[in-house]
Amino acid sequence: MDFSNQPTVTPSQPEPTPVVGSSEESLPQEQPELSPGPASAPAVQRRVVSNFGSDVISSMQSLLGTIVIAIFVITFIVQAFQIPSESMENTLLVGDYLLVDKLCYGGRGPGDHLLPYRKIQRGDVIVFHYPVDPKQHFVKRVIGVPGDRLRMVNKTVYINGKPLSEPYVRFIEPPSNLLRDNFPRTDMPVIYGMEGKWWVEMRKLVEDGELIVPQENYFVMGDNRDDSQDSRYWGFVPRENIIGRPLLIYWSVQTIDQETAAGRAYRFAYALTHLFQNTRWNRTLRLVH
């Protein structure tokens, strides 16, 4: 066969492969290394100072944000209180630390009807500003609500003519005190420990031997009924004085009776060094009822 008319493919000549290092032109030009000189030091320092300043500003912003949130929570939502006296034993003991819900009763604003706030009820334990000295905080139990007719006979509380069931009450003495155990009394002069202003006001609110609780006011007493300075001695708690309702005992610690300055310092040091032993673990994280 004649292949003379067939197209032929002529293989192209391979291009010569450059040999590394075969010529000076193929070598990359070496770049001289730059060593930091005196002129570059201020720039490095400026970057360090700038980063440090940014970190400080960021930390301050985080700290301020935390403080603002804490203030908001303490002011409007929940606050910690300590029990300093025996008036609520055995429900609350000296050395109990409480978290108090400040929102449960609402803020008495127009939005209270839209949110699930609850009314103050008979039997609620409340924290409030002491009416005689609002700088002090007291904790007692609500016994009489607005409109109630209240009296005590031999330590038994009667509300609207019916005896009140009080399983939480603690008595340490037999009936013996005329005002403490039988209330109200208008047939005797003002008693030691009783506020004179309250004595005058109380006499105007007694009808048929019963004390009528006015609107926007509450009659409160301590659970340790024989050792409690409460509404029997200084009067009603106005609604605006009520802070909130204790939620739980977040910590409870046994206390040492030392009233002097040196004694308080010793008590603090002792509590720190015996924290585990002094904590009442069976009361810690207990709900308050």
Image (cartoon, helix red, strand yellow):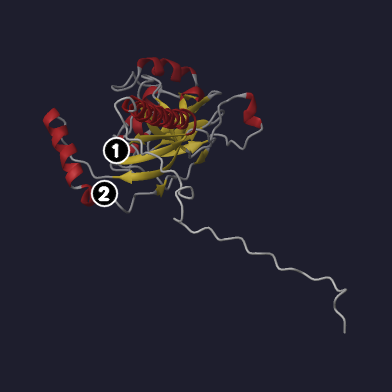
Q: Is residue 224 left or right of residue 115?
A: left
**C-alpha distance separating marks 2 and 1:** 18 Å
Q: Position of residue 196 (x, y in %)?
A: 36, 15
The amino acid at mark 2 is Thr
> Residue 260: x and y, percent?
13, 29
In percent of width and height, residue 2 lies at 87, 81
| Label located before the other in sequence (2 or 1) | 1
Residue type indicated by callout 1: Glu
* Horizontal side, residue 212 vs residue 85: left or right: right
- Mark 2 nearby-residue class (10 Å; few <14, some 14–19, many ≥20): some
Which mark identifies residue 72?
none
Q: Residue at x 29, y 23 (%)?
A: 193
Of tags 2 and 1, the one toward the viewer is 2
Task: Give the image location of residue 3, x and y in percent.
Answer: 85, 78
Cβ–Cβ below 8 Å for labels 2 and 1?
A: no
Residue 216 visible, this angle: yes
Of the 4 image quadrants, the one containing the N terminus is: bottom right
Q: Which residue is mark 1?
A: 86
Q: Secondary structure at mark 1?
A: loop
Location of mark 2 (residue): 279
* Secondary structure category for the residue under label 2: loop
| Number of other residues with Cα within 10 Å of mark 1, as a class: few under 14, some 14 to 19, many 20 or more | some
